[in-house]
């Protein structure tokens, strides 16, 4: 029997995560978003799992028209405040979706999905396929995921299944001849534990361009 208590449901879990602290993230854009999107021509962007808005605000500051999506109303409130403070509030639309249940409408020149990994269940494969469907012609799908626990994490806080580079591409089931894989790699970066133990963490990066419709 599955546990259906409210605290195990994704919406309740993530709302509590944001509501119970003043800030979860730094407010800065993800490093790999900056690396992979800096050379893209600005257009319309969809930021899936936008959190407190760091990525969306960075994209908007570079001329993108952004739709930021998150499951937590508290996160979206903070994201909107961040955007206004940064002077780009008029370039971002915020929408609350429980991805896997609902999904934003339209097609976008950039669909960004950073770290759609959760200790409570989401239909990750289904969400990523919907993300690919939302990419406009000649647009870009950018996916970044943790590849493993940090090297200093000797006792993981919960069981997790991590992706593989080839596994995610297989799950996407992208039609041959209509997509070009521009980035497919493992990136290792320094990581420091809350107790100050130095180590590293590996992330996977996929940047894929839709070449046909």
Image (cartoon, helix red, strand yellow):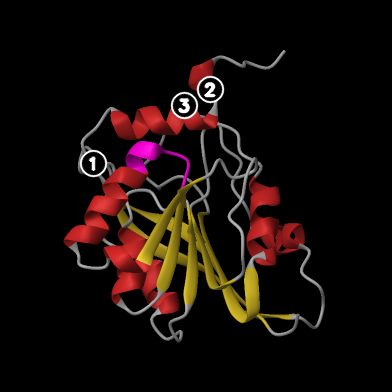
Q: Is residue 71 magenta?
A: yes
**Neighbour tally class for label 2: few under 14, some 14-19, many 20 plus, Cα within 10 Å:** some
Mark nearer the viewer, 2 or 3: 3
Badge 2 marks a residue whose secondary structure is helix
Q: How far from the left and from the top, in percent, is residue 168?
A: 68, 59
**On screen, residue 193 above or below 10:** below
Q: Is residue 113 magenta?
A: no
Q: Name the residue under label 3.
A: 12
Badge 1 marks a residue whose secondary structure is loop
Total of numbered circles in the picture?
3
Q: Name the residue under label 1.
A: 23
* CA separation in Å, label 1 and label 2: 22 Å
Residue 130 found in image quarter: bottom right
**Who's the residue at 73% across and 61% down the image?**
172
CB-based contact (under 8 Å), mark 2 and mark 3: yes
**Neighbour tally class for label 1: few under 14, some 14-19, many 20 plus, Cα within 10 Å:** few
* CA separation in Å, label 2 and label 3: 7 Å
Q: Quadrant of the N terminus?
A: top right
Q: Which stretch is magenta?
A: 70-75
Residue placed furthest toward the left = 85
Report if residue 192 is visible in the image: no
- The mark that comes first in sequence, 1 or 2, is 2
């Amino acid at each position: 029997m599955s546990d259906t208590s409210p605290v195990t449901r994704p919406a309740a879990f993530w709302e509590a995560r944001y509501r119970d602290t003043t800030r979860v993230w730094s407010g800065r854009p993800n490093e790999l978003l900056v690396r992979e999107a800096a050379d893209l021509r600005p257009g319309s962007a969809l930021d899936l799992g936008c959190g407190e808005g760091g990525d969306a605000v960075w994209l908007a500051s570079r001329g993108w028209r952004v739709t930021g999506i998150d499951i937590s109303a508290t996160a979206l409130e903070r994201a909107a405040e961040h955007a206004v403070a940064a002077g780009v509030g008029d370039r971002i639309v915020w929408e609350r979706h429980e991805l896997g249940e609902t999904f934003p409408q339209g097609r976008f020149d950039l669909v960004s999905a950073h770290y759609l990994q959760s200790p409570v269940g989401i239909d990750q494969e289904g969400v990523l396929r919907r993300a690919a469907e939302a990419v406009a012609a000649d647009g870009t799908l950018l996916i970044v995921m943790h590849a493993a626990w940090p090297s200093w994490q000797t006792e993981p806080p919960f069981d997790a299944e991590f992706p593989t580079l080839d596994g995610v591409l297989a799950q996407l089931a992208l039609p041959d001849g209509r997509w070009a894989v521009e980035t497919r790699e493992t990136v290792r970066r320094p990581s420091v534990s809350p107790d100050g133990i130095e180590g590293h963490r590996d992330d996977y990066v996929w940047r894929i361009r839709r070449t046909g419709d």
